[in-house]
Structures are given as C-alpha cells and as structure tokens.
Image (cartoon, rainbow, N blue to C red):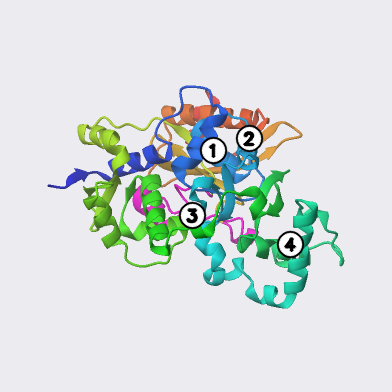
Amino acid sequence: MPHIHLSVQDARHLHLAAQGLLRASRRKAVKADVLAAIRRMALLQIDTISVVARSPYLVLYSRLGAYDPAWLDAWLAQGALFEYWAHEACFVPIADYRLLRHRMLDPSSMGWKYPEHWLGQHRQDIEQLLAHIRANGPVRSADFARQEGKGNGWWDWKPEKRHLEVLFTLGRLMVKERRNFQRVYDVTERIHPDWDDGRDLPDPEQARLDMVKNSCRALGVVKAGWVADYYRLKRGRYDEALHRLADEGELIPVRIEGWKHDAFVHAELHDALTEAQDGTLKATATTLLSPFDPVVWDRKRAQELFGFDYRIECYTPAPKRQYGYFVLPILQRGKLVGRLDAKAHRQQGIFEIKALYLEPGVRASARLAEDLTRALANLAAWHGTPALQWGQVPAALGDLIATR
C-alpha cells in the first residue's frame, strides 16, 4: 500500500488532535473530562512550582478550559489514578499500574529515584516506618519533625522523607491522596487491594510494548526516535516495534515532508488523517502550555515538529536565564508562536505578564492580539487573578493589544 504523504503542518495538527489541543472545547468541563484527558495523554507529569497553577492543573486547563482543580485530587483519592515514576513523577490511570510495576520490583536502573545505599544504611528504620503506617494509617512527610532545623531543598530531605520515597519507589507505599499538594502515603495493599503480582503482572516485554503503544496513541504522530522518551524507556531502536504495530493495524505508515525517517499515525486518528489528506484539518485553539506539557517536554521533538527550541529555566541560575523562571509556551492555532513569563499574584487578584516573546518570524497581527488577549483573560480568570498586568511585550503586539 502506498504511503500517505503529509506536510509538517499536518503532522503538528495530528499530534495536537491526539493530545486534545487542536480545538478548544465547546462545552463546560465536567469531572469526567479530567480523567478522560489523562487517559488520552497516558501520563500527567507532576511538578510543585506554583508561580502560576501547578503544572498538572495547568496541563489540564490547556485542554479543558476552566474546570475545578479539585477534580484531579478527587480522581486520585478515589483510586482512578496513581502516582509513580513514568516520564518523571506522573499521575497515571490505575489500569496502567501493570505497566510500571516492573520498575517497582526492580528499581536498580532508576538512578537517583532509588538511592539503594540509603536503603542499605537505614533498612531497619525503613521497615519500622512501614510497620507504623500499616498499623496506624496514612502519613505525610510533614507528620515528622525535622531534628536539625529547616531543610535546604530536595537534596536535604529529613530522614523520614527519604524513607517514604524509598518505600514509594519500591511500590510498598502508594500515594493515597494529596492535601495542599502534599503526598499522603499508605501501604499499597490498602490502596490497590485487587492487585496480585502472580496473577496480574505481564511479562516485561509485553509491558514495554504496551508502553510503546500508549506512547504512539498519545503522540498521534510518531517516529522511532521519539518512542523511548514518553515513558523513559531504555533508548534503542524501535523501528521494528513500530513496523510490527503497523502490520497489526494499530499504526498507519506515512511520509512527512522533509523527514528522512519512517513516520506513523495512530489508527485512532483515522478520521483526522482523512481530514488532513483533504486539507480540512484545522487548528483553532489558542492557549498557554505548561513547561511540563507533553507537547514540549521532549525538546528534540518540539524542535522537529514545531521548530520551537524550548528549555525550562527554573533550574538555571537567574543571571543565566534567557526568558524567565517559569515560561509558558504560547500555542496559537497549531503553532508555537512565543513564550510568556508570568506570575499569578493571588492575594492581589493580579496576573502579571512579566515578559512576552514572539518566536523569530512570527508577525504581530490583529488575529494574534485577539487570540492572545482572550486566552490570557480566560487563564487569569481561572486563576482567580482577573486583572492583567502587562510588562515587557513586543512593541507592535503591545500596540495591537492596547486597542482591544
């Protein structure tokens, strides 16, 4: 069968369709939409930075529009989601617990996420903590007082926090819920009582293949070099796996203009692929993305698909930052057109736009000004900070915004 030929724009649109970012929702979000969006993405990365909404809530907002963030917390507490190391720390649908269970049983390749030396040095204390939770119920790290004053960040955790993280990585504890975004840990047998390793655990190769399938579905458009990153699988050649999925009908082989490598579209996007071939697949959504959004978390993929070179700078010393601490990519009608350094001042009700940068070649236009003004007003309102405070903005765009 001859390959379908697509432009890079078609590939972008199909990727956004798979991620739920092609068109804005036309109805008010409901609680079920949160779970559906996470299942669609397969993974929802967790980060605690809160200069604007914390990343998992912002990723959902980009897809759903205004919704109640408590719905995410509720799905976790109800057991529809669980937390574990996937791309990084992520909320994952509970149905995919089986895919990550192998990492819990053998975490030796997980690097800093599993400090084996700490387990060896403190095994007795760790087992005592586990016994305490089993006997007395869930705990938070905050339930244990620091003995030597205030800590200096993640590298200076108190011993109980380290113990909890080791038990979490080993899968002996799970996150029961979050309170004020703090993890509440309980023993796995209470949170996921129906699981049985002997009965439910797939073999490692099947689990890996199922993660590849999930990655392909979530990405929409995929090539071999993109597969490993989504679940942080072992890097290697995935061409054979993708061609096998194509032979089984799960992927559709395509040619992307200017790409040398084989590419594939997930079969669930068949209708959207038909629209792309007809020239009728259009992107209409304009929104702000989290730095930890799946669209941009793989720097190489974002460059290849969108021509967008993005690196989060919150971990970079301030004098070395190019754009800002927590910069949000701007998605407008299928393109990443700029980036925004913002901060929500919740007590004052102000959403501060410290600086807005347009990508090279992006022209300030009336449509861009209208799309961006509306998107920012909606985002600010959802934050409870409805007053926009403008800082550094390209002059031509600022003039157009001022006339709105």
Q: Quote the CA–CA distance across marks 4 and 2.
A: 31 Å
Viewer-nearest of discs 3 and 1: 3
- Per the image, the residue denoted by label 3 is 200
What type is the residue that disc 1 sits on?
Leu
> Regarding mark 4 in the picture, which secondary structure is present there?
helix
Residue drawn at x 36%, y 67% is 236
Residue 158 visible somewhere in the drawing: no
- Per the image, the residue denoted by label 1 is 60
Q: Nearer the viewer, residue 293 or 352?
A: 293
Mark 4 surroundings within 10 Å by alpha-carbon count, few (fewer than 14), some (14 through 19), many (20 or more): many
- Which residue, as the protein is rendered here, is positioned at the far left? 1
Mark before the other along the chain sequence, 3 or 4: 4
Q: Is 83 positioned to the left or the right of 266 in the image?
A: right
Q: Quote the CA–CA distance across marks 3 and 1.
A: 30 Å
Image quadrant where residue 20 sits: top left
Q: Is 78 positioned to the left or the right of 21 in the image?
A: right
Q: Quote the CA–CA distance across marks 4 and 1.
A: 34 Å
Asked if disc 4 and disc 2 are in contact, CB closer than 8 Å, the reply is no
Viewer-nearest of discs 4 and 2: 4
Q: Quote the CA–CA distance across marks 1 and 2.
A: 9 Å
- Per the image, the residue denoted by label 4 is 130
